[in-house]
């Protein structure tokens, strides 16, 4: 691991390397990792070959014992690091939630078609979820209360992770992999790639069942990605008996993140907080 300090003790975010050696399935070298910055803020990251988990602990006096794995979007090519990562971690902390931002492998590796999700991203998400559970005691979180939140491609990754926990996508490395990789709840924001193009059918990798975790879904009707992606998810979950809440806003486009705007889509964080309270995740 890059660091073994407890984020609760350190007071600063802690970065952990997900894999003890080379990430599974990596057969080609890619260019050096690249970060794009604006006014000193890292806005996006690409060329990720060493995935990490950046953990922001909730303040001790307000900690709820809840953990949240955050997956930024970016079309599986880049990671929208600030507005779908760092900003979400701060929001989670304000609710007493310890957040881990997942820097998963991007871009797609050679041999992965544009309409196919890259398996490396699922491996990274499953590994990160297991690590959060393995370190739950150290970080002051309940291993039975760790959810996942994702945007756009990260929303697809959240749905993918939430419906494929029964079979790990890589060979176990260590004791951390003895922990479950199933999110206890899922927050899926403007997901893309969950349905077969020009149909209302979920893609094969999105395997909704009655074991799928309770989910909160939000999207805008005018999203260029097509709001059918979230409607199909909602319908499948409802049919399977999964507790699910969906908010489909009239306007908002794609990529609105958590930024305060005049549009109705900007209210999703408050609706999500209310949902987490109703479901018993947040007091």
Image: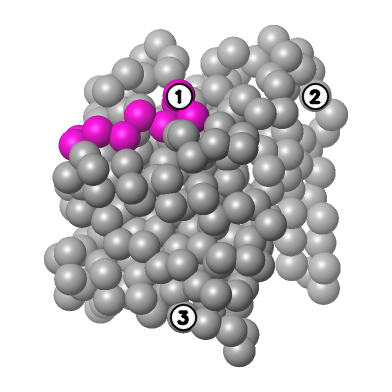
What are the residue bounds of the magenta stretch?
203-211
The residue that disc 3 covers is 267
The secondary structure type at the circle numbered 1 is loop
Q: Position of residue 195 (x, y in %)?
A: 52, 37
Q: Residue at x 24, y 33 (%)?
A: 209
Asked if residue 241 lies in the magenta stretch, the reply is no
Of marks 2 and 1, which one's residue comes earlier in the chain?
2
**Near-viewer residue (189 or 124):** 189
Q: Position of residue 116 (x, y in %)?
A: 62, 25
Of marks 2 and 3, which one's residue comes earlier in the chain?
2
Asked if residue 204 lies in the magenta stretch, the reply is yes
Whether label 2 touches label 1, CB < 8 Å: no
Q: Position of residue 121 (x, y in %)?
A: 55, 31
User: Which image quadrant for residue 127?
Assistant: top left
Q: Residue at x 45, y 26 (%)?
A: 205
The residue that disc 2 covers is 30
Left or right, 87 with reference to 163:
right
The residue that disc 1 covers is 204
The secondary structure type at the circle numbered 3 is helix
Residues packed near mark 1 inside 10 Å, few (<14), some (14 to 19) or many (20 plus): few
């Amino acid at each position: 691991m890059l660091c073994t300090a407890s984020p609760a003790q350190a007071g600063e975010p802690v970065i952990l390397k997900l894999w003890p050696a080379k990430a599974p399935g990596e057969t080609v070298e890619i260019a050096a990792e690249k970060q794009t910055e604006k006014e000193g803020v890292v806005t996006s990251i690409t060329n990720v070959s060493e995935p990490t988990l950046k953990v922001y602990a909730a303040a001790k006096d307000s900690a709820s014992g809840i953990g949240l794995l955050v997956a930024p979007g970016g079309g599986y090519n880049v990671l929208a690091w600030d507005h779908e990562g760092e900003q979400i971690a701060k929001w989670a902390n304000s609710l007493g939630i310890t957040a881990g931002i997942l820097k998963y492998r991007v871009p797609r590796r050679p041999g992965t078609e544009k309409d196919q999700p890259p398996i490396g991203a699922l491996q990274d998400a499953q590994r990160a979820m297991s690590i959060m559970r393995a370190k739950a005691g150290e970080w002051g979180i309940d291993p039975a209360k760790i959810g996942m939140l994702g945007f756009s491609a990260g929303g697809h990754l959240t749905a993918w992770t939430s419906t494929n926990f029964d079979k790990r996508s890589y060979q176990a490395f260590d004791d951390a992999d003895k922990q479950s990789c199933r999110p206890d709840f899922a927050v899926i924001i403007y997901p893309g790639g969950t349905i077969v193009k020009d149909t209302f059918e979920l893609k094969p990798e999105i395997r909704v069942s009655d074991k799928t975790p309770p989910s909160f879904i939000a999207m805008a009707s005018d999203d260029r990605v097509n709001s059918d992606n979230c409607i199909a998810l909602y319908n499948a979950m409802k049919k399977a008996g999964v507790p699910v809440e969906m908010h489909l806003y009239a306007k908002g486009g794609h990529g609105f993140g958590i930024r305060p705007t005049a549009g109705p889509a900007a209210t999703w964080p408050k609706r999500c907080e209310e949902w987490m309270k109703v479901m018993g995740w947040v007091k």
